[in-house]
Image (spheres, rainbow, N blue to C red):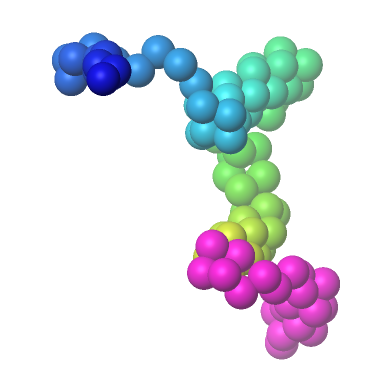
Amino acid sequence: MQTVQRRPLWLPRTHVRPGGVLPILTILAVLLVLVGFRQPDFLDPPSLMSFLGRSAPIILLAAGQYFVIVAGEFDLSVGSLVTAQVVVAPG
């Protein structure tokens, strides 16, 4: 009979799973620091708000596609959604 060693509950996990969130957040933080060094104006609040305003439609589409894929309905028709958004938004 084998005994399985378990880690104590108070001991935090020290390994990173492949595909976890930590590597993605680390890469995003490094990119933000690099862009901040190359373009210091990028980190100003008006510039960040402008960037978020311009990227908000893509963020909403990505969030919607995420929920569709997680639900098991493999639908990647982002092109038609962007076209519909461009047609509806100016009106």
Residue 13 seen from this side: yes
Location of residue 48 with respect to 2 vertically, above or below = below
Count of all numbered marks drawn on residues in the image: 0
Nearest the camera: 25 or 5?
A: 5
Which residue: 52% across, 33% down? 20
Q: Which residues are magenta?
A: 69-91
Q: Is residue 63 left or right of residue 51?
A: left
Q: Is residue 75 a member of the stretch shown in magenta?
A: yes
Q: Quadrant of residue 47?
A: top right
Q: Is residue 90 left or right of residue 49?
A: right
Which residue: 69% across, 23% down? 31
Which residue: 61% across, 48% down? 52
Location of residue 65 with respect to 55 vertically, above or below = below
> Which image quarter is the C terminus in?
bottom right
> Which image quarter is the N terminus in?
top left
Residue 64 seen from this side: no
Nearest the camera: 16 or 3?
A: 3
Q: Quadrant of residue 9?
A: top left
Q: Is residue 49 left or right of residue 88?
A: left
Q: Is residue 22 a member of the stretch shown in magenta?
A: no
Nearest the camera: 59 or 21?
A: 21
